[in-house]
Amino acid sequence: MLSALCSGINYDAFDFAIREQILSFFNDFLRCNCRDSPLCGCPERKFAEKILELRENGLDHRQISSFLLDEYGIEIFPADILSFLEDSVHVLEAISDVARLRGRQELYRQTGEHIRLIER
Ligand SMILES: [Zn+2]
């Protein structure tokens, strides 16, 4: 994370902006009360959730990449975001199949809805 935040940034020109980005990152991903924080898995989970939320709100993989760079100073290539989104759909499809087989209607409905929002 720190290497991502620090790469290619001119500190003299962007000192305030960088501080804002680091603050946003901490607020959005590193606030939890787990004993093992930040090694509890929450930051990774919240970060993955953020990317899915941005996609479900209508941003495409390029726009998500720009957003992460502007908001947190984190550079992730659009192609990597696209492949993360595809992997997420595969996981959701697997959950959806199991939910259907087990008669978990609500879970089946929710996974279907998330798949629809990510794929549109
Ligand atoms: Zn945690």
Image (spheres, rainbow, N blue to C red):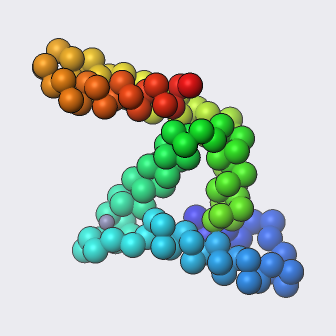
When the figure is inspected, residue 112 is found, relative to residue 53, above or below; the finding is above
Q: Please name whichever residue, 19 or 53, is drawn nearer the observer in this view of the structure.
A: 53
When the figure is inspected, residue 86 is found, relative to residue 60, above or below; the finding is above
Number of labels in the image equals 0
Task: Judge from the rendering whether residue 104 lies leftward or rightward of residue 8; answer left or right.
Answer: left
Seen at 74% across and 83% down, the residue is 16
When the figure is inspected, residue 119 is found, relative to residue 85, above or below; the finding is above
Seen at 18% across and 24% down, the residue is 105
Q: Quadrant location of the C terminus?
A: top right
Residue 29 picture location, percent across and down: 46, 65
Seen at 39% across and 72% down, the residue is 31
When the figure is inspected, residue 50 is found, relative to residue 37, above or below; the finding is above
Residue 41 picture location, percent across and down: 35, 58
Task: Judge from the rendering whether residue 13 lies leftward or rightward of residue 79; answer left or right.
Answer: right
Q: Quadrant location of the N terminus?
A: bottom right
Residue 23 picture location, percent across and down: 57, 77
Task: Judge from the rendering whether residue 91 lies leftward or rightward of residue 80; answer left or right.
Answer: left
Seen at 70% across and 58% down, the residue is 69
Residue furthest toward the left? 102
State whether residue 87 appears in this view: no
Find residue 43 and report its image quarter: bottom left
Find residue 80 and report its image quarter: top right
State whether residue 107 appears in this view: yes
